[in-house]
Image (cartoon, grey):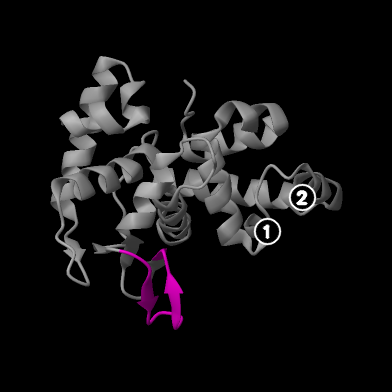
Amino acid sequence: MQLLYDKFEFYQRLPQNQKTYFEHRVATFIKKYPFIGKDGITVTNEMKILIAATAVMLTFGMRKYLFTVIDKIIIYPDVYFSTFNQAYHKGEFNPRMKAIVFSWKHFLEGYAIDNDNLNLGLHEFGHVLHYQGIKSSDTSATIFSVTYDEIMKEVKYPANYNRLVQSNYFRIYAYTNEFEFVAVILEHFFETPEDFKREFPQLYEKVKMMINFSSTE
């Protein structure tokens, strides 16, 4: 998969044996889920590989890495109107439709700058992973769910919450609700791991435990 060598930094940093493992997971992901183009967009191999690689990166430390809470990937060329909540979106996870949806333009923008902590693919797959943790009973999902609960318990302590907000490390959108918080911290974990570790070392270790992996190792 030459595209991974050319365009996916996470893959580039892996040792060769893990590259092979990563490639296998990407290929399996692509075979499992249909990719559906909307508003005239043609689904390309680049779309399939980069979207699949994003999901695999997020779940690389997990034994069960395929999602049961989605059964399709929908791709729009740009911002689209969602019937799920009657609003325009760049991306979303729709649990009722069992779909993850992306604006391809904005998905690519998530990788254009690799350290701005804004990655649409990671963010939306973060929602999928969170929901999987709630709905599934396999070991990986259970570890995610239990560790997530521990994280939220710590975050809700006023002193901890105030320090998080005052640090300005996580964008304010993270504090919208618990689902957004976990999606945002996963973006930070992969995009700026050294900053995360320095700013909030205990939270960093919890996230590492939650997904059974570290982006810096």
Q: Examine the structure image and report whether residue 79 is included in the region drawn in magenta.
A: yes
Name of the residue lying farthest toward the right:
159
Q: Position of residue 178 (x, y in %)?
A: 62, 60
Return the residue at label 1: 175
Q: Which residues are magenta?
A: 78-92
Residue appearing at x 46%, y 36% in the figure: 114
Disc 2: CA contacts within 10 A as few (<14), some (14-19) or many (>=20): some
Residue appearing at x 52%, y 44% in the figure: 186
Cα separation between marks 2 and 1: 8 Å
The three-letter amino acid code for the residue at tag 2 is Val
Disc 1: CA contacts within 10 A as few (<14), some (14-19) or many (>=20): some
126 with respect to 176 (left or right): left
Q: Position of residue 12 (x, y in %)?
A: 32, 23
The three-letter amino acid code for the residue at tag 1 is Tyr
* Circle nearer the N terminus (2, 1): 2
Counting the numbered discs, the total is 2
115 with respect to 58 (left or right): right
Camera sees residue 11 = yes
Mark 2 and mark 1 residues within 8 Å of each other at the beta carbon: yes
82 with respect to 73 (left or right): right
Q: Which mark is residue 165?
A: 2
Q: Examine the structure image and report whether residue 139 is included in the region drawn in magenta.
A: no
| Residue toward you, 112 or 145 | 112
Give the secondary structure at mark 2: helix
Residue 208 placement: quadrant? top right
Q: From the viewer's perspective, is residue 20 above or below residue 101? A: above
Q: Position of residue 69 (x, y in %)?
A: 34, 62
Q: Quadrant of the N terminus?
A: top left
Give the secondary structure at mark 1: helix
Q: From the viewer's perspective, is residue 1 above or below residue 177? A: above
